Amino acid sequence: MLMTNVHASGTRGASWPAAVVFDLDGTLVDSAGDITTSLNELLIARRLSPFPEDTVRDFVGDGSKALVQRAFQTRGVMLSAEELQIAVASYDEIYGRHLVEQTYVYDGAIDVLARLKTRGIRMGICTNKFQDKAERVAVHFGLDKYAEVIVGGVPGRPGKPSPIMLIETLEALEMPREDAVLVGDSTFDVQCARAAGVAVIGVTFGYSQTPMRKLNPDAAIDSYAEFAKACDSLRIKAA
């Protein structure tokens, strides 16, 4: 259990961070292709025009419900709460059939995970993606060999930007917040980390409509080749 609620701006030693928590979609993996295929299959079944992948990328990041709602609204269809629930369930079933057809791990991500594991750094995945699908993606790409904990979306628990998921992830890792860093690609990730009192590294290659550096993460990286340098910079800032 977490024993402290100290903000991440405290002094950091040479071994910091002791834990790294990663978002999944747009951070460790690019799943936009499979999400686009699945969303368009749903829309076509409802006799609505499909979207290009670039447009769907702008819909991603807040979970399936927001994704489906945005797509229908953009096509001029306002769904009732019941209709939206049915549409999300249909999308979820379709996406489950296309989950890892086009999805891929970002360049350098596995190398970073492997180096962190070699150093004994604890790792977890914290994502708004539904729990079952997050686990399937992690297992398919071998991410579960590195992430000890996978915390995905479940009914009844707020997703990011609420800090609850991140706090639960760190509790499962038995790591205090000031010793951890969250890596993510969206405003929700930055807001989640801020609310939890955890340092945050933003990746610029994800799905955020707002350029990551404008979201003011503690550090930003354009590729995983810059990850170690970003951690070093955060140690120096807190010294």
Image (spheres, rainbow, N blue to C red):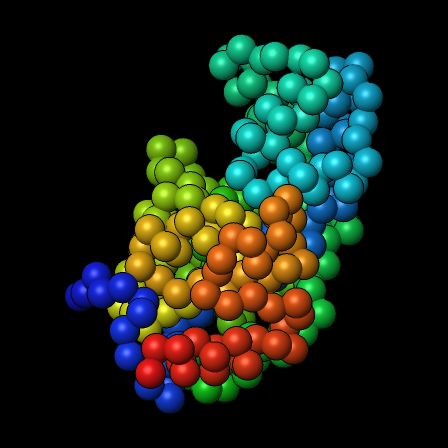
Total marks drawn? 0
Q: What residue is drawn where x is 51% and y is 68%? A: 219
Image location of residue 26, percent across then percent down? 63, 54
Picture quadrant of residue 42: top right
x and y, in percent, of residue 198 in the image: 35, 62
Q: Is residue 135 among what the camera can see?
A: no
The one nearer the camera, 92 or 189, is 189
Q: Is residue 56 visible?
A: yes
- Residue 118 or 159: which is nearer the viewer? 159
**Could you say which quadrant of the image residue 48 lies in?**
top right
Instruction: State the quadrant of the C terminus.
Output: bottom left
The image shows residue 19 at horizontal and vertical percentages of: 39, 72
Q: Residue at x 71, y 31 (%)?
A: 39
Q: Image quadrant of residue 174?
A: bottom left
Q: Which quarter of the rendered picture does the N terminus lie within?
A: bottom left
**Residue drawn at the location 47% of the way across and 52% of the way down:** 189
Left or right, 157 with respect to 77, comes to left
Side (left or right) of 97 relative to 175? right
Task: Answer with left or right where residue 56 lies relative to residue 232.
Answer: right
Task: Give percent across and percent down for residue 212.
Answer: 58, 55
Q: Residue at x 77, y 28 (%)?
A: 41
Q: Pick whichever, 220 or 123, lies toward us.
A: 220
- Residue 3 in the figure: left or right of residue 36: left
